[in-house]
Amino acid sequence: MAPLEAYAGFSIGRMSIDKTFTGNLAGTSQNEMLTAMTDTPGSAGYVATEKFVGTLKDKADSFALRHHAGRD
């Protein structure tokens, strides 16, 4: 991925995360995340979408999750 443009006092990050799950919930997921931070200490946020493919107690399926959090 190409770096995102930086702005004065504000930074944006982007990452891809691959996960593997074992146990009652078994499978893999792919996650795309965007983050933002400012020069203000403790000020940050992120949003991510994750797609899981696998089994839950021997039932196969897939689903998507949305993650988000922020601090001002």
Image (cartoon, rainbow, N blue to C red):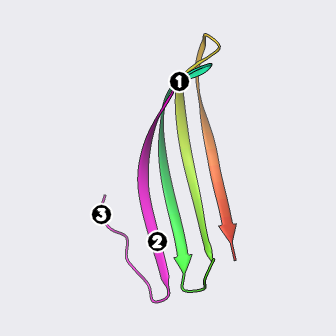
17, 7: nearer the viewer: 17
**57 horizontally vs 28: left or right:** right
Q: Viewer-nearest of labels 1 and 2?
A: 1
Question: CA separation, marks 1 and 3?
Answer: 32 Å
Q: Please say if 1 is above or below 23.
A: below
Q: Are marks 2 and 3 in contact (CB under 8 Å)?
A: no
Q: Nearer the viewer, mark 1 or mark 3?
A: 1
| Residue at which label 3 appears | 2
Image quarter in which the N terminus is found: bottom left
| Residue at image coords 65%, 56% | 68
Find out whether the residues at labels 1 and 2 contact each other: C-beta distance under 8 Å.
no
Query: Dot 1 lies on which element?
Result: loop
Q: Is residue 3 magenta?
A: yes
Residue extending farthest right:
72
Residue at x-position 56% and y-position 52%: 48
Q: Tell me the magenta residue range.
A: 1-22
CA distance for labels 2 and 3? 12 Å
Query: CA–CA distance between discs 1 and 2?
Result: 32 Å
> At numbered mark 2, what does the secondary structure look like: helix, strand or loop?
strand
Residue 47 pos. (x, y %): 59, 57
Q: For residue 65, which quarter of the picture?
A: top right
Measured as percent of width and height from the top left, residue 60 is found at 58, 14
Is 25 located above or below residue 13 in the figure? above
Q: Amino acid at mark 1?
A: Thr
* Label at residue 12: 2
Q: Which amino acid, by three-letter code, is at mark 3? A: Ala
- Amino acid at dot 2: Ile
Which residue, given by chain and number where applicable, does mark 1 sit on? 22
Q: Which residue extends farthest left? A: 2
